[in-house]
């Protein structure tokens, strides 16, 4: 009589063990796949940010002198730097660069504009600092704070001796 209870308990234990054994790879695959999907979502967000900036700069460029536009962007976690006008902040170029780190892997996203782009030197604390590279005081984080940033893009006439072409000036309105 005790053998039947023991046999039922052993069979139940074997069935539960088999279910657990099968569920471990499924759970592992789920976490692996979800991490990959989160990385893809961040990549799409960064491409969207680049698209908004370049499209807005193009729009202001084609509208000409006196035109400006204010845009609001969401910065996802993991962005380390954003450069307007390339890494060289002395003279404007036609590129926007975003540096992003995901799962220990560094990524660089670049998009080119038909207009020259330059960021405002008044919004940087260091000469070669990235334009939106604002971190709270006493922060040791290498990442930019995620959240909303507000940018103003305006058409600027080049001064005759400084740069031969007109350009789009990008200013960060919030900190």
Image (spheres, helix red, strand yellow):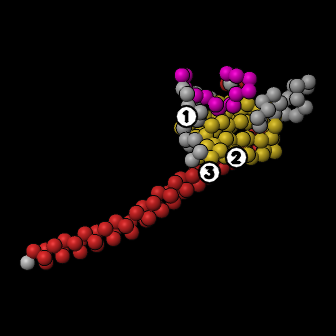
Compared across the picture, whether 95 is left or right of 132 comes to right
Tell me the quarter of the image containing the C terminus.
Answer: top right
**Number of the label disc, if any, that sits on residue 98:** none
Query: Toward the viewer: 34 or 92?
Result: 34
Element type where label 1 sits in the image: loop
C-beta proximity under 8 Å, tags 3 and 2: yes
Magenta residues (range): 125-138
Quarter assignment of residue 114: top right
Compared across the picture, whether 20 is left or right of 175 comes to left
Q: Residue at x 33, y 71 (%)?
A: 18
Element type where label 3 sits in the image: helix
Compared across the picture, whether 159 is left or right of 45 comes to right
Q: Is residue 160 visible?
A: yes
Q: Which residue is drawn at 83% across and 30% down?
A: 91
C-beta proximity under 8 Å, tags 3 and 1: no
Give residue 32's position: percent from left, percent from top. 50, 58
Element type where label 2 sits in the image: strand
User: Tag 1 or tag 3, which sits nearer the N-term?
Assistant: 3
What residue is disc 3 on? Answer: 43
Q: Distance between the residues labelled 3 and 2?
A: 9 Å
Query: Toward the viewer: 83 or 154?
Result: 83
Compared across the picture, whether 57 is left or right of 70 comes to right
What residue is disc 2 on? Answer: 109
Q: Looking at the picture, does residue 50 appear above or below residue 126? A: below
Give residue 168's position: percent from left, percent from top. 77, 35
Q: Magenta span: helix, strand or loop, mainly? A: loop
Q: Residue at x 70, y 46 (%)?
A: 109
Magenta includes 87? no
Q: Distance between the residues labelled 3 and 1?
A: 17 Å
What residue is disc 1 on? Answer: 145
Q: Looking at the picture, does residue 88 appear above or below residue 29? A: above
Query: Toward the viewer: 77 or 101?
Result: 101
């Amino acid at each position: 009589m005790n053998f039947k209870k023991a046999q039922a308990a052993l069979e139940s234990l074997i069935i539960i063990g088999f279910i657990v054994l099968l569920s471990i790879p499924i759970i592992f695959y789920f976490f692996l796949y979800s991490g990959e999907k989160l990385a893809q979502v961040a990549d799409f967000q960064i491409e969207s940010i680049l698209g908004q900036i370049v499209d807005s700069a193009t729009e202001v460029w084609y509208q000409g002198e006196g035109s400006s536009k204010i845009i609001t962007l969401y910065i996802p976690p993991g962005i380390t730097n954003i450069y307007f006008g390339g890494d060289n902040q002395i003279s404007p170029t036609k590129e926007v660069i975003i540096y992003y780190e995901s799962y220990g892997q560094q990524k660089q996203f670049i998009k080119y504009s038909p207009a020259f782009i330059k960021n405002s030197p008044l919004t940087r604390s260091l000469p070669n600092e990235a334009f939106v590279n604002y971190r709270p005081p006493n922060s040791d984080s290498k990442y930019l704070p995620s959240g909303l940033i507000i940018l103003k893009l305006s058409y600027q006439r080049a001064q005759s001796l400084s740069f031969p072409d007109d350009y789009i000036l990008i200013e960060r309105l919030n900190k």
